[in-house]
Structure formats: structure tokens, C-alpha cells
Image (tube, coloured by chain):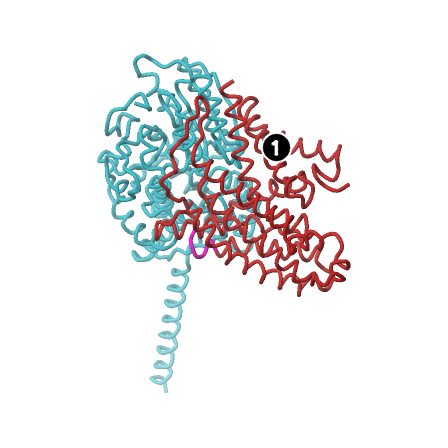
Chain colours: A cyan, B red
Amino acid sequence: MIRTALRSLLRASGIALASALFAGAAAAAEPIKIGFSMALTGGLAGAGKAALIAMEIWRDDVNKRGGILGRPVEFVYYDDATNPATVPGIYTKLLNVDKVDLVVSSYGTNEIAPAMPIVMRKKLVFPSLFGLAVNDEFKYDRYFQIMPAGPEPKLDWSRGFFQLAAEQKPRPKTVAIIAADAEFALNAAAGARANAKKMGFKIIYDKTFPPSTTDYSPIIRAIEATKAEIVYVASYPPQSVGIVKAAHEVGLKAKMLGGCMVGLQFAAIQKNLGPLLNGIINYDFWVPEPTLDFPGVKEFLAKYQEAAKGKGVDPLGHYLPPYAYAYLEVLEQSIVATKGLDQGKLAAYMHKATFKTVVGDVKFAKNGEWAKTRTLQVQFRDVQPDNLEQFAGPGKRVVLYPKQWKSGDIAYPYKQ
Amino acid sequence: MDLFVNAIVAGILLGAFYASVSVGLSITFGQLDIVNIAHPAFVVVGSYIAWILNSRFGLDPVLVGVLAAPLFFVAGVLIYRVYYAAFERTGQESLSGLAFFFGVMFIIEIVLILVYGVDYRLVSADYLGRNIDLGFVGLPLRLVVPFVVASAMTGAVWLYLSRTFTGRAILAVAQDRLALQLMGADPVRIKQFAFGLAIATTAIAGSLLIVIGPVEPSLGRGYIGRAFAIVVLGGMGSIPGMVIAALLIGVLESFVSSFAGPSWAPAVAFGALLLTLAVRPSGLFGRA
């Protein structure tokens, strides 16, 4: 009788123990939900979709390794249609309905800024993807921006361009600045204006243009009429293409052209513009030069290029995807180091740590930007027509600035 | 002086392209009273077809546009059949019809995104990147070719509408449907044909758009306001009026970009529209 009772007790204990273990395992396997909006349609969708591919590669890599702190990672995301007005609603839904554990940003300044008030109200860390000077206004201490613009993003963005100009002999004197009427381009132009003045250049043309402009030749002719020696352009992809073509057609005689032309980093546009790019000096964040061969970046790009096939996105993925992978690496390393999802601890760790990522070592400044700028100024060289493969290797986008990452000397003037 | 002349020339080249985008809308919106908000989306489809055949087979993008026009005509006829059966026949075309074309626009965008992705698409052709230099006036072939083709297309549409029986019937259907029936013509068939013709022009306009610059699926949205403004300014259905309005907008944009600052260009162009409508509410060539 007693033996039977003991046996029943043992059996019951065994079942209870197994249930407890099972329940524990289930709790441990509860996914970490990361929420974000992303531009998957609309004008910035080319970059947004490429970013999503990179983020999914990170998620799959993490889950293959057993997740973070034993928990798999799951994404909850919505298309913001490149429309900033949709962003607050998306983040409200992510936090209140989907109950995500963490949020990261969409791509680009115009899509990041509208999420800030929502994220700040909940006191969440906010790893951000390519926002220019977003935190200048918000001054949020849990904002961490992965684009290597530097601690003074508006100024750091164009400092290299004007430093290169200042080093030339004879030193050029006059500058023209044109910028698209959009927040990012206007921020970049404001920084260019400040740098030009600080370094003693005379700004003789300073205008903005509507992003819907079809033909840029009247603008380029107006600049040509001023005989500006340096032309700084802040533009989005379709405008960048139009401006490069117009500069060629008009025969712009400036000695330096470029600066902040988004789109010249994209493979399809590089292939189409071909030799028209030669001599242009433009910002970039990663190019396949030997000075930027960080551990893991080539492996990541191989995975990206495989995943991007047939998806109508940038086939090489040099510009944005490594950083879209890296901002999640930063988050992962912070969670592992703090052993949890406590937002305060995560933010404190992100402020003090140096992160090892596929884009090299990342250290944040107090304002959440990179502690030290790595906004590259690269010059297109010896670009041949209709050849995409040429951009996969070194030599076509030579790094001129910063000196630490330099891979070649400037060819000056631009039209030579 | 150089800048002045070049601004006018660039404006005329640009205006002719605007006319190619607007000529179809002048028929649908101006003459058939169909608010086809999806018109620029069809233009983008034309661009994609030009890009596909140019990138895969090396065909000239403008030639592709011309070859694709009959297919677009058939598509236009079919779309009108649906529109007629669903809305016009029951007299619900005003608001429901507008919603229908909004839907068509979004479907076109989403299908392009799903099938071809969101990357920017560009074409190659020998003449792209070349210039004709006439003294101090530079004529980039990237704009000259669209100018020539757009002028030819717009002229052909105008001649067709003004010189042929069907063309006159299209003009008549907008004015007096009953009288047209009494003349033995079927207004629905006439409108169907006219809508097909309007959509056919988007194939060519799309090929010109991608010759000028890169294209992505949502690019058409930027042309909705401009194309409708040109049609209204020209006088709702008047092809010569539409051409003059397009040239006026093109020259004004170019002129303001050259001398005052590009940001003012749309404001001045649309200001001219408002001013014209204030003085002449029926538009430049509209019937009072």
C-alpha cells in the first residue's frame, strides 16, 4: 500500500518536474520581438528593401546560433510606403498592439524623425538606420545611429569634401550649393554651407530645388554662369542621375562636383551612368577598397548578394546593407552583455561599449552618433561603360578621406 | 543672353515631353470626362516595358514604346469596358469612378514592385549622353529625342481627332451624346476607342520618360498634378491648348530655375495656372 502510494507520488513528482522543465523551456524559447517600419514601397523602397534583406540575414544568423540569451528573434514590421505620416501609427501599433520587445528605425531621416516622439515616450533604446542629424532636435539619450556621419553629423557629412577642396593648389575660392527640398538634403546643405564658410570659401550660388524636377539642365547652366569652382550637391537618386547627366550635357567646368548625391552608391545607377561618373567626388560609407576590409563584411556581402538575386534591389549592396546588419549586431551585443532587455541598461551599455561589427568598430558619442566620423569621400575613377562587375572590386571608388581609410590620391580638377 | 536662350530652349524641350504625358489625359479627362488618375501610372508601365526590352534585347526604348502602343490600346479598351459596366452605365462614374482609377494606380504600382522590385530602372541608347551644339545653345539628345517623338505623337493625335470621322465623333461624344447617337454612332464604342487611344499614348510617353531619367514604380505620382494642370490650363480637351499649356509650364519652370531659383518653379507654373483660370475660367483654348 505504502509502496503503491510512494510510486504514485514519484510518478506525480516526475510529471510535475517534467511539466515545469517543459514550461521553463517554452518560456525560454519565447521570441524576442523586434518591431520597425520600413520603406518597402515608394521612393526610398530600393534602399528599404535592401535593408530588410540584410536584417533578415542577421535574424537568420542569430537564430542559427540559438538566438539571443536562448530566445529566437522574430521581426514584426510594416511598410511605411516612404510616407513619414504613416510612421507614428506604425510604432504605436508595434508597441501597443503587437507588444514588441524592442524597436529599431526605418531607413532614412524623413522616416526616423516621426517615430522619435513615440519611442521617447516609452523610453526605449532606438537603434537608427541612416538618419542625418535627427537627434539634434530631440536630444534623446537612447538614440543610437549607425551611419558613420560623426558626432556633428551636419558638419561631418561634408567636412571631408571641403577639406579636399582646401588642399588643392591653386586653392579654389568659390562654391555653389544645390539641395533638394527634403529634410535630409537640406540638413546636408546646411552643413556644407557652414563648412564652406568656416574654411574660407565664398558661396556664390545657394539654391534648393523641388524633388519632382524633371530636367536639371537649367539649374546646371545657372551654376555654370556663376563660374563656381566647387559644386556641392545634396540630392536623392533620380535627381542625382539628372544632375550628373545635365552636368555632362552642359559641359560643367567646375573643378569639383559631388558631395552628397544619394544614388551614386547604387549599382544600377553606377552601371547606367558609367564613365559620366569619372572624377565625381561623393560621400560613401563602404566601398571594396583594401583599407575597408573589415572582418565579416565580405562574408555578409556574399550572403546579401545571393539573397538579393531576383528581388529587384541593389545587387551589390555596398551602401546600406552592411550597416543594416551592423545596427542589429549592436543591439545583439548589448542584450548579451546586459543579459536582458532592460532599456536603461541597454542604453548605458551602448553609450560606453565599442562594438565589433561587419562595418568595423562602432563607438557612439553622447548624442548617439558615431564618436568619430567615417563619412568617406570617394572619387570615381576609370569607370567603364555598361559594366556592373567593375564596381564589385577595388579601384573604381577610391577613398580620398578620411586619411585613416585613404586608398588613393585625388584626381583634380574634375573635368580633366 | 546664353542663359536666357538656353532656358527657353530647355523649357520647350521639357514642355514637349509634358505634352506627351498629358495628351492622353486631355482625351480622357478633357473630352470623355473620365478622371483617370491612373494615367501617369500607365506612363510608368510604358517605361518598364521600354526598360525590359532595352535591357534584355538592346532594343531602342522609343521604338519599344511605339511597338507597345497597340497593346496599350487593347488594355485601355478593356479597362474602359470594366469602367463602363461598373460605373458609367449606372451613373456612378463621378466618385466611384475616381476611386476605381485610384485603385488601378495602386494595383499597377504594387504589381511593378512585386514583379520587378523597387530599384531604379534606366535604359541605354547610343544617343544618350550626346549633344547637338548650335553655337552657345546646347541640345542634349536625351531631351531632343523625346521632343521630336512627343511632337510627332501629339501632332498625330491632333490630326486624327480633327480630320477623321472617328476623331470627330470622339470630340462630339463629349459635347452631345444624343446627337451622336442620332448620327448613327455608338457613344460607348466611341468612348471605348478614345480611352484605348489615350492609354496607347502612355506607352510612348513612358518610353520618353525613361529616356530622360531613372524610373521606379511610384514615380507616376509626381506627374498627376502636373498633367491635370496642363489639361485644365489648355482648356479641357483642346489638344492645341494642351500643347501650349505644356510648353508654357515647361518654359516657366526652366526660366524660373535659371533666374530665380528652382524651388520657385512649381509655384510660378501653378501660379500661372491660377492666374489664367481667374481671367479665363475655361482655360487657354477652352470653350467658354
Quarter-of-image position of residue B267:
top right
Quarter of the view holding residue A255? top left
Q: Does the magenta stretch mainly form a helix, a strand or a loop?
A: helix
Q: Is residue A70 positioned above or below A50 on the image?
A: below
Q: Position of residue A265 (x, y in %)?
A: 36, 38
Q: Most extreme residue toward the bottom, as rendered?
A: A1
Residue B71, position as x, y percentages in the image: 50, 58
Specify whether residue A78 is in view: yes
Between residues B273 and A361, which one lies in front from this camera angle? B273
Residue at x-position 50% and y-position 27%: A218
Task: Report the residue at 35% width, 40% height from top.
Answer: B126
Q: Identify the residue position indicated by label 1 in the image.
A: B248
**Badge 1: few (under 14), some or many (20 or more) residues near its Cα, within 10 Å?**
many
Q: Look at the image and give the residue range highlighted in magenta.
A: B112-117
Amino acid, disc 1 = Leu
Using the rendered view, name the quadrant where residue A376 is placed.
top left
Residue A345, above or below A408: below
Q: Is residue A82 magenta?
A: no
Residue at (74%, 58%) from the top-left corner?
Answer: B180
Where is residue A204 shown, x and y percent of the image?
47, 16
Quadrant that contains the C terminus of chain B = top right
Secondary structure at badge 1 equals helix
The location of residue A360, given as percent across then percent down, is 29, 38
B88 on left or right of A354: right
Toward the viewer: B114 or A351?
B114
Query: In terms of depth relative to the viewer, which is nearer, B281 or A115?
Result: B281
| B8 shown above or below B121 | above
